[in-house]
Image (cartoon, helix red, strand yellow):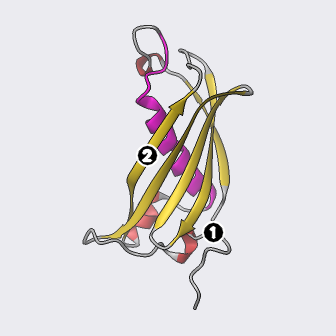
Amino acid sequence: MLREHEIEIRVRYQETDGQARLHHANYLTYFEMGRTELLRAAGYTYRQIEEEGWMLVVSEISCKYFLPADYDDLLRIRTSVVEARGARVVNKYEVFRGDELLAEGRSVVACINRQGRVTRLPKSLLLEGDAPAS
C-alpha cells in the first residue's frame, strides 16, 4: 500500500461561506478525495474494493484549522497512511496553500464485509511490515 499521496484542489465558489472562505465542512470532503486518490495511485479503487466484498467506512474523523482558505485558492492536500493493520486504516491529512499549513486532520477507516461485520483488511491494503503473521 502506498504511504503518501498529494492532490491539488482549487476552492470553488459554492464551497465557501458568506465571507468567501472555504466552509469548514468541506475539509472533510477534501480528506475523502485525498483518501480516494491515494488508493487510486496505489492501483485500487473504492469500486474495486467493494466489488471484492469489502467496504471502508469512516469510524472517526477530526480536523484542526490554523488559517482560512479563500475562494479560488489552490490547495494541496497531502494524505498519509499512518497505520493499516487488522481492520483499520489511520490516515493523516495536511492542507497547504503554498507552504502554509492551513489545516490538518486524522481519520480512522474500518473495513467491513457485506453483512456489515468488521473484518480484516485485504492484504493489498496493508502497509509493508503491517501484514499479519502467517
Crowding near pointer 1: few (<14 within 10 Å), some, many (20+)?
Answer: some
Query: Residue 109: percent from the left, percent from the top?
Result: 44, 57
Residue at 66 percent of width and 58 percent of height: 3
| Residue 127: numbered disc | 1
Which region of the structure is painted magenta? 20-42
Crowding near pointer 2: few (<14 within 10 Å), some, many (20+)?
Answer: some
Residue at 40 percent of width and 30 percent of height: 25
Quadrant where the N terminus is found in the figure: bottom right
Residue at the far top in the pictured view: 19
Quadrant where the C terminus is found in the figure: bottom right
Main secondary structure found in the magenta portion = helix
Residue at the far left in the pictured view: 115
| Residue 61: numbered disc | 2
Q: In this view, does 12 lie to the left or right of 81?
A: left
Query: Secondary structure under badge 2?
Result: strand
Residue at 53 percent of width and 22 percent of height: 11
Indicate the amino acid at tag 1. Answer: Leu
Residue at 44 percent of width and 30 percent of height: 26
Q: Is residue 127 above or below residue 20?
A: below
Query: Residue 30: percent from the left, percent from the top?
Result: 50, 37
Q: In this view, does 116 lie to the left or right of 80?
A: left
Query: Residue 102: percent from the left, percent from the top?
Result: 61, 27
Query: Secondary structure under badge 1?
Result: loop
Q: Which of marks 2 and 1 is nearer the N terminus?
A: 2
Is 40 within the magenta?
yes
Q: In this view, does 53 lie above or below 74?
A: below
Query: Residue 14: percent from the left, percent from the top?
Result: 41, 19
